[in-house]
Amino acid sequence: MTYKTINTYDSTTKRLRLGRFLWIRGNVGNGYGYSAMLSLSLTPKLFQWCHDVATNLSREWCLTLCGLRLHYKRSYGGIIV
């Protein structure tokens, strides 16, 4: 598991991106593993829940609670950088 510091402000979404955790399970690309990311950011919202509705799979979701936004994303086809 690695942590990357971002520390940038996105004016279009009004979000301060703090950093993200990245990890790999198994062998990515052959169907037996995946690459995952959990990012942290600050946003001016009290509560919000969103998930990947288009494919109805739990590969991506985000949760905002008291201004702290957690965003989880999983990729089976390639490594997230």
Image: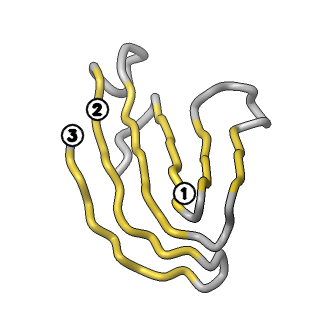
Residue displayed at 78% across by 36% down:
53
Upstream in sequence: badge 3 or badge 1: 3
The residue furthest top is: 32
The residue furthest left is: 2
Upstream in sequence: badge 2 or badge 3: 3
Measuring from the top left, give residue 74's x and y in whole percent: 48, 35
Residue displayed at 29% across by 24% down:
25
Q: How is the structure coloured here?
A: secondary structure
Query: Mark 3 and mark 1: span between their CA atoms?
Result: 20 Å
| The label number, if any, that marks residue 1 in the structure image | 3
Packing grade of label 3 (10 A; few <14, some 14-19, many >=20) is: few
The amino acid sitting under disc 3 is Met
The amino acid sitting under disc 2 is Ile
Measuring from the top left, give residue 45's x and y in whole percent: 68, 66
In this view of the protein, which residue sits in the foreground, 77 or 49? 49
Q: Nearer the viewer, mark 3 or mark 1?
A: 1
Query: Mark 2 and mark 3: span between their CA atoms?
Result: 8 Å
In this view of the protein, which residue sits in the foreground, 77 or 61? 61
